[in-house]
Image: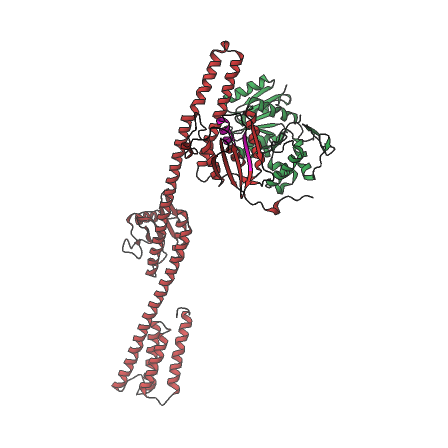
Amino acid sequence: MVRILLVEDDTDLRRTLAEALRVEGFNVLTACSAADAEAQFAHLHREGKPDLVLLDLSLPDGDGADFLANLRARSGLPVIVISARHEEALRVQLLDEGADDYLTKPFSVPELFARIRVALRHRGTHLAAATTRYAFGDVVVELHARRVTRNAQEVRLTPTEWNLLARLVRNAGQVITHGQLLNDVWGSDFREHTHYLRLYMSQLRAKLEMDPTSPVMLLNEPGVGYRLAESA
Amino acid sequence: MQQISPRTAFWVGFLFWGVGLLTNMLVHDLSTSSHAMLLVLASTLSAMWWRQYQVLIGSAIAVLGFNYMYVEPVGHVEVKHAEDLVLLVTTLTVSATVAFLMDHLKRSRARADAAAKYAEQLRELSERIRRATAPADLAAILQQEISLLFQEPVMVRMEAADGILELGEPTRDEQAALAHCARSNRAMGVGTDHFPEFPATALPVRAPGGSVGSVLVRLSGALTNPDTLVHATAICNLVGTEFARIEAQNNADQERAEKQVQLMRSTLLSSIAHDHRTPLATILGAVTSLLEHQERLTPYQQVALARTIADETEHLIDLTENTLQLARLGAPGIQISADWEAADELIAAVVRRSRQRFPSTSIITSIAPNLPLVRCDAVLIVQLLDNLLNNAIKHAETDESIVVGAKRDGEALLLSVADRGAGIRPAMRGTMFDPFSRGSGRGMGLGLAVCKAIASVHHASLCMRDRDGGGTVFEFALPIAALDASSLPQEN
């Protein structure tokens, strides 16, 4: 059974979320602070350790950033950050520092399950590129063959377009921040060049989306980054 | 005479004496009185360069030498004739008088020069303090200027609105003197007639309304030039006046900010009073109904109640976000995090969410091709479009589509939301962007006020007009910033 550690200081929200997760069939551990979560990690045996962490940003003993840093130093365990809408800057910072995805409070339970599902699918893919084939609608991307087809017709991409799409495919379903995309596709000197990203996303949409003005695959998360819709 | 050193001045004066004495010795066929006249001439010329006592000593030596060499009996310091005595006394007196007048003239000249220099310093100082914006900066300038003037350690104590500023390290006695000087608004210590035995000089820093602080100069010796005290007083008054002006301005700014906060607080309180209660009452009604009459409700009714709870909660979330956003945007000195954004992406994100939330409403987009990127805060623009779209959805009276558009209009990017609602009554148009104005029934509360605030922080305009064929169009015009073409990506 999949084990989830829920780190949330609000008692009611913690109880409600834990209940919803148990109904969905997860084994739920809870912690009410970063220190509590740390302690649980220290005492649990290997086989009792969680498979995924849901981390609230505003904890009584810190913003969760230290906890994430400690966790990342030890393991690539998937972490989903839960934040209030006004905590944009911190949310992007934690995503850049290795959190896998985020949810903005208030969120619905189906949204939460969708994020958990994607994060678990990517579990362990921080080291090995397990996702090599992506399909959505009439579009198929094959990473190993460096090929994109739409309705079985090959789509020609420029090298940069390909690099950007491949980066998104490797984390399909998960948000990737502007900074991460710019860093991974163009290099660390280009982290502030958001306009590159806008132009290339627009080119990719023109080539791959049915209606580029109402995209269903290459999705924008305003103020955070981009998300490639889950492979279907 | 100011420009040359005392040493040079001495040698110039000495030269005149030398020339005078040499002439006296070389030219022999002169009368005694002519010799005396040459001496007077040498003394007068030397007086232009020499200090008073130097001229007197020089004259005395010359008169003795003259007596010895030319006055009968020659070779003796004696006077034989009464006429020669008159000549000697006159020569000496004239030399002394000239020396005295010259010295007086030189002193006044030096004073005038110093006064001009001080005036120039004051003018430079007044320009420097005009650039200072904080009371602490002024206190630092004052300390620096006064210590430059006296070349002695200087303590400053200024009474600002938010506490006392103290510079330097005054001893306990000096602290007491500083406080006393500021309170009595009177100079004290060395060089003044108030506690002249105190081993330092304290000056009040005066402003039109009274003193605003004081400075203290820890003197290591006596006060050499009383003029420096006058100049120091002028500096203190100049800084004091500016200090009072900055304090008054800061107080006014603070009052304005406080008023703004007051206004915001009352706005937020009314928001909660007006708009949050209704959805809360509805939610509570639905929940209690589910809890208490569950067995009597059909599954369909149960789902309908749950749906109501979800809808009202969403409404409450919008209200809360708008209330918080208005508070944030209303705060003084708000900073937005602007980045390059594509209008079509922002619209797509908003429309995608609205379609999920209101599946039965038809929303279409009309986006012009090749729109330029704009610099804006994506999160705020999304909230603005969200509000306008929710507004349109709530006021829609027909099934006709709501159109969200983007096009270029000169040097602005025009984002628009158009509906086929009943339109806005003319009476409402003046106030609809104010918090709590509402159309019919339940309004957006702060929605349009937040939109207006978001437009304002982007230096953009937001306006409403009637749509051709009925309904309303809200138009948001965002200025297009130039994107440096050389910074665009290159790829073959």
Instruction: Give the tally of numbered discs.
Output: 0
Residue B397 included in the magenta stretch of the image: yes
Residue B85 or residue B261, whichever sits in front: B261
Residue B336 included in the magenta stretch of the image: no
Residue B23 or residue B491, whichever sits in front: B491
What color scheme is it? by chain
Image quadrant containing the N terminus of chain B = bottom left
Question: In the image, residue A24 lies at what x, y percent?
Answer: 60, 18
Question: In the image, residue B107 lies at what x, y percent?
Answer: 34, 68
Left or right: residue A70 compared with residue B297: right
Q: Which color has been applied to chain B in this rendered view?
A: red
Residue B238 or residue B175, whichever sits in front: B238
Question: In the image, residue B240 lies at what x, y percent?
Answer: 35, 51
Image quadrant containing the C terminus of chain B = top right
> Which chain shows up in green?
A
Question: In the image, residue B407 lies at what x, y percent?
Answer: 56, 38
Left or right: residue B446 compared with residue A79: left
Q: Quarter of the image holding residue B353?
A: top right
Q: Quarter of the image holding residue B77?
A: bottom left
Up/down of B13 relative to B355, above or below: below
Residue B433 or residue B225, whichever sits in front: B433
Left or right: residue B371 compared with residue B470: right
Up/down of A215 relative to B65, above or below: above
Looking at the image, which residue sits at the far left? B82
Looking at the image, which residue sits at the far bottom? B29
For the record, the magenta segment spans: B385-406
